[in-house]
Amino acid sequence: MSLLYAVIFLLAGGFRPSRFLKLKQNNQMKKIVIIDGGPRKTFNTASILEKIAEGAASAGSNIEVKTVRLYSLDYKGCMSCMACKIKDRASNICKFKDALTPVLEEIAEADGLVLGSPIYFGDVTGQMRTFLERLAFPWLSYNDYSITAAKRMPVLLVETMNGTPERNNSNGYGSMEHCIAQALGEPERLTAYNTYQVKDYSRYELAGFSEEAKRQYRDNHWEQDLQQAYDAGRRMAERILNINI
């Protein structure tokens, strides 16, 4: 490049250290961890989370998406061992060792987090609640009651339920939503209502439900639910990469 062209290039803002740093950061691999708190591998919650993963991956080759199925892990809830609160060795990552340990460590270094659960008796599954105990308790300081994670990141909370928008008893993620918002940032929410419970209603004692009505609702809404999931995944990835499309 001649001296004249170089001067014009620089005057036009062709090279800016901040822009170079941003491009370098965007070229680094970013990770989104998806936590599947549902028991069924291929049904409503799993399908929604799969679409979120597809949407996130579509944002760029430097987005890595990892899905963890809680029902496939052997782990416990908070053991009240207080190892995360020991003086001079306090940690915002659970210190109890079991199959959940590497998952919690991976989340601490991730760039985005998706939590998904069906709603049973108005709440997330027991596995999801148990996981959340282990995730959130180390964030809490008993010195000043602040709630601090290893790093902040975009969060998406997913619910699938048999209830309708007009009639349901969901408490969502309950008190854990406050912990998540304080530690990681205000989460986005995605809910799929009135989902199919089984593929063949004639095989089960489910006379309180109209299979025809459930099928009609699913036909009118399920593809939209999946598209919203895909869009939410892509939106999270773009936010992480600071892409404005």
Image: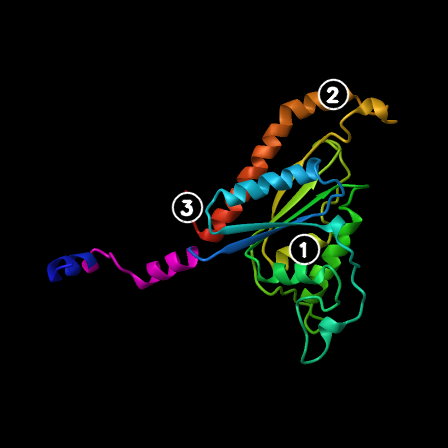
Between the C-alphas of marks 1 and 2, the distance is 36 Å
Q: Please tell me which of labels 3 and 2 falls first in the chain.
A: 2
The residue identified by callout 2 is 213
Q: Position of residue 223 (x, y in %)?
A: 60, 28
State the mark number for residue 244.
3
**Which residue is located at x 72 percent, y 71 percent?**
84
Name the quadrant containing residue 26. bottom left
Q: Residues within 10 Å of mark 1 (few under 14, many from 20)?
A: some
Q: Amino acid at mark 2?
A: Ala
Q: Residue at x 53, y 45 (%)?
A: 56
Q: Element at badge 1?
A: helix
Q: Earlier in the sequence, mark 1 or mark 2?
A: 1
Q: Residue at x 57, y 63 (%)?
A: 151
Note whether 71 is above or below 13 in the view shown. above
Q: Is residue 125 magenta?
A: no
Using the image, determine if residue 121 lies above or below residue 8.
Answer: above
Amino acid carrying label 1: it is: His
Give the magenta range.
10-26
- Can residue 16 be found in the magenta stretch? yes
Q: Pinpoint residue 90: horizontal percent, then vertical percent.
A: 68, 74
Residue type beneath disc 3: Asn
Mark 1 and mark 3 residues within 8 Å of each other at the beta carbon? no
Which quadrant of the rendered structure holds the N terminus?
bottom left
- Determine the CA span between mark 3 and mark 2: 40 Å
- Residue shown at 75% from the left, 40% from the top: 40
